[in-house]
Amino acid sequence: MAKKNEQFVTVLTDPNVDFPQWYTDVILQSEMVDYGPVKGTMVIRPYGYGMWENLQRQLDQRFKETGHQNAYFPMFIPESFLMKEAEHVEGFAPEVAWITMGGTEELTERIAVRPTSETIICSMYSKWIQSWRDLPVLINQWANVVRWEKTTRPFLRTSEFLWQEGHTVHATPEEAEEETQRMLEVYREFSENVLAIPMVTGRKTDKEKFAGAAATYSIEALMQDGKALQAGTSHNLGQHFSKAFEITFQNKEGKLEYGYQTSWGVSTRLLGAIVMVHGDQRGLVVPPRIAPIQVVIVPVAAHKGGVMEVCQQVEAELKAQGIRVRLDDRDTVSPGFKFNEWELKGVPLRLEIGPKDIEKGSALSMRRDTLEKAALPLEGIGETAARLLDDIHMGMLQKAKDYLAAHTYDVHTLEEMGERLDNGKGYVRAMWCGDRACEDAIKEKFSATARNMPFQQEEIDEHCICCGKKAKKLVYWARAY
Amino acid sequence: MAKKNEQFVTVLTDPNVDFPQWYTDVILQSEMVDYGPVKGTMVIRPYGYGMWENLQRQLDQRFKETGHQNAYFPMFIPESFLMKEAEHVEGFAPEVAWITMGGTEELTERIAVRPTSETIICSMYSKWIQSWRDLPVLINQWANVVRWEKTTRPFLRTSEFLWQEGHTVHATPEEAEEETQRMLEVYREFSENVLAIPMVTGRKTDKEKFAGAAATYSIEALMQDGKALQAGTSHNLGQHFSKAFEITFQNKEGKLEYGYQTSWGVSTRLLGAIVMVHGDQRGLVVPPRIAPIQVVIVPVAAHKGGVMEVCQQVEAELKAQGIRVRLDDRDTVSPGFKFNEWELKGVPLRLEIGPKDIEKGSALSMRRDTLEKAALPLEGIGETAARLLDDIHMGMLQKAKDYLAAHTYDVHTLEEMGERLDNGKGYVRAMWCGDRACEDAIKEKFSATARNMPFQQEEIDEHCICCGKKAKKLVYWARAY
């Protein structure tokens, strides 16, 4: 058993040596995920899916509070639909999985498995919407989507993934813009308050925007290897799709108008962000608010009189506080084995309870985020644990904010930019003239992309970092997943 | 407006004249569902999806209380996997949608879009399970599945539908059988207590069992046109799949054994059952426990002083009781229009509140199930409404039970069987010798199938109704969806 104990620690690659390998080790060994048999697919195992369920519930609540309803649209899209919006087809067609046979029958028109649902949803909206009275339409869908990708990694880029996609229609461009930004703010707030991940929010450049959008906004997170991860997007679609799909409504003046649309989404990619923002050498560090198990109780010398009884009592008190608690009463492995296993799985708080603790009227706690140990009085332990979980959340968020601040650099020359990207890691903030050529040059030179143009604009330089012309926008650049 | 009012009533086909057309009218006009662009697909609109969400939440809770965890497996299954279990491939291959292209690339092996997930899940289980310590594995998945059907109807039979599928592995055949029956009982209890639908529970004949199962059990509901609907199944898979997929474990004695498996599922088909069991000439009658809106408040003479204030107060009191309430404060349509609309949508309880009601200190209620009206005191209306919703549930369940009892006939001759199927409508209970030939003959003669062999067996005759040989089983027969 001692042997198996150590296994948990030693098989994880050092994240400072090989971050990608560490990531793969952690997600596989913590049993969050496994590889599916078809290339590029993933199996989300119960521990990973438990996080997704907690994430989904809390995000869905926010969607409903902002007036949205859920629905479900078919995943089968006729090829002709995908072709209707020019930019959209160009962006998505190369990644589509095509169904060409139903049973033994060859199909007359190929069917796309949805890479995103704008086209099929728009085809329904054009049927449902007639009058300004039907607006706004505020619908969200939780679904699987498919993109046939060449290079894949679990959560970050897989041929099938889970997501939500909001699709709304409004009577005015102002309302559509308001909705686009409202939902981005929902994502930002959710990421901080539930996932403990601070985000850089802003608008995408035209090069990086969604295929078919008028404007795309994004939340961008910074991983511990200094690479950025686009964690969610919100698109103002303008009338691009409503014109392609004839979504018209009679306005209050009796005139026929095309609707103004938005779409927005986050995916199981967020699970990858959680791993790479919070994890450490021992494995996962799961933010308490989405942790499938928030507190694990490990009995020490469980056979000794009274130990299991106290453990069960503590379990009941924590449950009464609404805490997701697991009493690990397995008698086939040692406490040390359990410690390592739950550390690898990133359970936010561990309580050890043995005869000596009981004598002292306390439990020995360990915070997964700081690894700090403390004796917690058994008296009122439910409330104490609830408070500690909040502290852990705040601590994790602060740590991630500090990391972000420490790895964000203002740069004024391309040399500086390269230096910071190579050695400093993280975001470089630099001014940009707005020309695609400069964006392309920076990507070519440094493999870095414009993550977004932050809402909080500052003029840190008068000149574009690349061409030296008059600068228009402050941009966050980074190497990215 | 008066014109539009009547529209809601008059466009519904009379269910006694043309039940299938009434069904289609109701589900489309209540905005539960719409047809998708690809043949056989459906769009589940917010009102229908709201029911599905309530259903899902309450069923999921039962799964978790019985020890199950959710996970997510890829919907892409290599063709070779489907081919591994002989009966399974025969049952499902003709209905598979095949992906043959990824982007612009022709695939070397065709990929099936899951018609059910036994094969892909088994391939993972064979990797994850080594020892008796890993058992039981109790996993459920909420997902979309695809079956390329020739004849489709929204909810009842569609090429894509939503469902849950439980997949478990056990160390002994007894445990697997216990699980199979436990989950069937979960379905039965859930159907009664949440959907207000009584079920006939029993075992399927070999002819009707799941392709690849050792034994299939089902819950069968009776629609108001006298046709049965298979509403859920639970399969004891024995070692069929574990042998095909090499799911082995070391038992406590150190010997390698094949696992014993189960699978079980219900789908969006249940939404169709709800419509056809409870609906009436005016439209849907939604069981309170899954109703997206449980109570609708309709202000009368809303412009009169105090009316809206009282309505809002009542709304708040109902919300405080945890009731899903909608205050219909639209000023673009009349109260009469609203009554018809909410009756079509089957909202269990309506409260009308106007100046006269307020004077009397009451609201005028109407139960959707019985159409009974009553004056409810405003004082304590939250609790009264909650109690009424429970009464409505009980009333709907009792009505459905009475219908089931009144349309279940014991028959002893084929003549009687035909007569009852044609004129009585519903289930005929008859003895059967156990031979496939008799089952085939009855299907041929009456288009009726063996729904199941009920758990509560009785010997109502010594002889098989078809061949006259010694009878072995009491069977529920019916025409079915």
Image: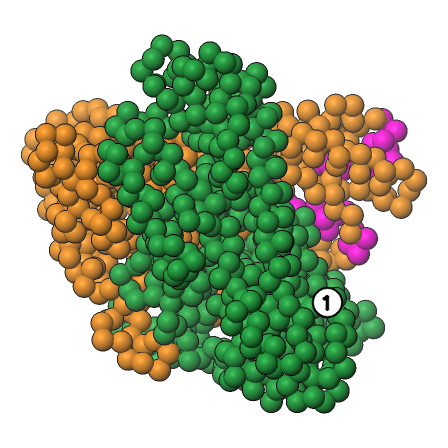
Chain colours: A green, B orange
| Residue A165 visible in the current orientation | no
Residue drawn at x 60%, y 43% is: A395
Quarter of the image for residue B228 reads top left
Horizontal and vertical percent for residue A341?
36, 38
- Quick one: B168 or A58, which is closer to the camera? A58
The part of the chain drawn in magenta is B331-360
Within-10-Å neighbours for mark 1: few <14, some 14–19, many 20+: few
Quarter of the image for residue A107 reads bottom left
Quarter of the image for residue A110 reads bottom left
Report in which chain the residue with disc 1 lies.
A
Residue B332 forms part of the magenta stretch: yes
Residue drawn at x 30%, y 67% is: A39
Residue drawn at x 43%, y 58% is: A16
Q: Which residue is mark 1?
A: A455
| Residue A1 visible in the current orientation | yes
Horizontal and vertical percent for residue B34?
52, 61
Residue drawn at x 56%, y 61% is: A222
- Quick one: B357 or A428, which is closer to the camera? A428
Identify whether B98 is placed above or below A59: below
